[in-house]
């Protein structure tokens, strides 16, 4: 009878890293709406803007920050209670602010004017 072969040590399974982002598909499933509606919510500042990535082969992917999922759950809760979209939009602005939803120059213009000590309506002092 042949000798039994010793078992090789089994590999430990790697722990999956928690995702710090979600995809458009995840948001559409949670909200129960179409992709177009999700992007409408972004335009209305109800959801944070996605991060666009391209690997050069498959096109552009949208990765959403993880807090977008929190916003989606909040939107669903408020819809279930009976609030309409403008009311939910006001609640989101009060609860989360708009800093995480607006990217680009629009968000920076009021801050830049305040940091210079000038408002957009004032003229420079004449000497």
Image (cartoon, rainbow, N blue to C red):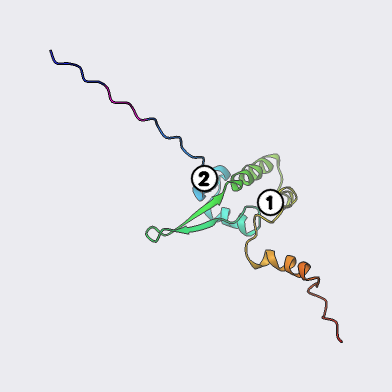
Where's residue 90, x and y in %?
A: 74, 52
Asked if residue 112 lies left or right of residue 42, the reply is: right
Dot 2 falls on a residue whose secondary structure is helix
Identify which residue, 19 or 91, lies in the foreground. Answer: 19
Label 2: how many residues lie within 10 Å, few (<14), some (14-19) or many (20+)?
Answer: few
Where's residue 96, x and y in %?
A: 70, 49
Q: In the image, what residue occupies the spot 65% across and 53% down? A: 46
Dot 1 falls on a residue whose secondary structure is helix
Asked if residue 11 lies left or right of residue 116, the reply is: left
| Cα–Cα gap, marks 2 and 1 | 21 Å
| Magenta-tinted stretch | 7-11
The quadrant of the picture occupied by the N terminus is top left
Q: In the image, what residue occupies the spot 69% across and 65% down? A: 108
Image depth: mark 2 or mark 1 in front = 2
Where's residue 126, x and y in %?
A: 86, 85
The residue carrying mark 2 is 26
Relative to 29, residue 93 above or below:
below
Which of the 4 quarters of the picture holds residue 106? bottom right
Asked if residue 38 lies left or right of residue 15, the reply is: right
The residue carrying mark 1 is 85
Dots 2, 1 in contact, CB < 8 A: no
The tag earlier along the polypeptide, 2 or 1, is 2
Where's residue 28, x and y in %?
A: 53, 47
Asked if residue 77 lies left or right of residue 21, the reply is: right
User: How many badges with numbers are in the image?
Assistant: 2
Identify which residue, 2 or 69, lies in the foreground. Answer: 2
Relative to 30, residue 53 above or below:
below
Identify which residue, 126 or 43, lies in the foreground. Answer: 126
Main secondary structure of the magenta stretch: loop
In the displayed orientation, state which residue is furthest to the left: 1
Q: In the image, what residue occupies the spot 70% across and 39% down? A: 81
For residue 15, which numbered disc appears in the image? Answer: none
């Amino acid at each position: 009878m042949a000798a039994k072969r010793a078992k090789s040590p089994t590999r430990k399974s790697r722990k999956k890293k928690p995702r710090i982002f979600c995809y458009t598909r995840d948001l559409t499933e949670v909200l129960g709406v179409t992709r177009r509606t999700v992007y409408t919510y972004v335009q209305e500042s109800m959801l944070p803007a996605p991060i666009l990535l391209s690997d050069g082969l498959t096109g552009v992917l949208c990765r959403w920050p993880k807090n977008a999922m929190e916003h989606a759950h909040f939107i669903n809760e408020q819809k279930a209670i009976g609030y309409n979209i403008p009311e939910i939009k006001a609640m989101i602005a009060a609860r989360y602010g708009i800093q995480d939803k607006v990217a680009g120059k629009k968000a920076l213009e009021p801050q830049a004017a305040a940091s210079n000590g000038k408002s957009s309506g004032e003229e420079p002092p004449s000497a």
